[in-house]
Image (cartoon, helix red, strand yellow):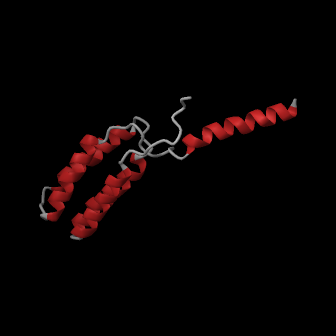
Amino acid sequence: MNVFKLMMAFFLTFLLSGNAQAAGNPVSEDFSLLLSLCDNMIELASRQDKGFPEVADATLKLAEAQRRNSSMALDRVRPKLRSAKKSFKMGNYEASIKFIEEAKLLMKPTTVSWDGGS
């Protein structure tokens, strides 16, 4: 009986390990509005436009609203956006753009190796 339980536990662990790599990455989340705001932030930062902080605030508020829907990806995106806003205020526009690009990469959907089908 113990061998059966051990083999069953190993089998279930093997099946669930395919989904473990997707944990924390966006699989089917829609970040289209957030991505377009990030594109606007990059454009404003490249022009050194003074409207950047307002767009950054709106982006952070939207990210916070979406994060409340249990989005684990946005927990890594929001610090990047805050760093971009801080870099812009300090006058480091290139670093601001770099942080936004890193945030956009974190919002790209990933593929799941095992879809649960037969």
Direction front: furthest residue: 118
Q: Relative to 75, is 82 on the left or the right?
A: left
Q: Position of residue 115 (x, y in %)?
A: 51, 34
Along the line of sight, the residue nearer the viewer: 88 or 6: 6
The number of numbered discs placed on residues in the rendered structure image is 0
- Position of residue 23 relative to residue 2, above or below, is below
Foreground residue among 21 and 54: 21
Q: In the picture shown, does residue 9 fall above or below 56?
A: above
Q: Name the spot of residue 96 as percent of width and height, x first.
A: 26, 64
Place of residue 82 in the rendered image (x, y in percent of width and height, measured from the top left): 32, 56
Looking at the rendering, in which quadrant would you find the N terminus? top right
State the image quarter where residue 12 is shown: top right
Task: Say left or right for 78 vs 45.
Answer: right
Say above or below: 79 vs 95.
above
Q: Residue at x 31, y 53 (%)?
A: 104
Residue at image location 23% in from the left, 64% down from the top? 88
Name the residue at 18% across, 52% down. Answer: 40
Where is residue 87, by image quadrant?
bottom left
**Of residues 113 and 32, which is closer to you in this image?**
113
Camera-side residue of 104 and 5: 5
Question: Residue 116 location, x and y as percent?
Answer: 54, 32
Direction right: furthest residue: 1
Q: Which quadrant would the C terminus be assigned to in this image?
A: top right
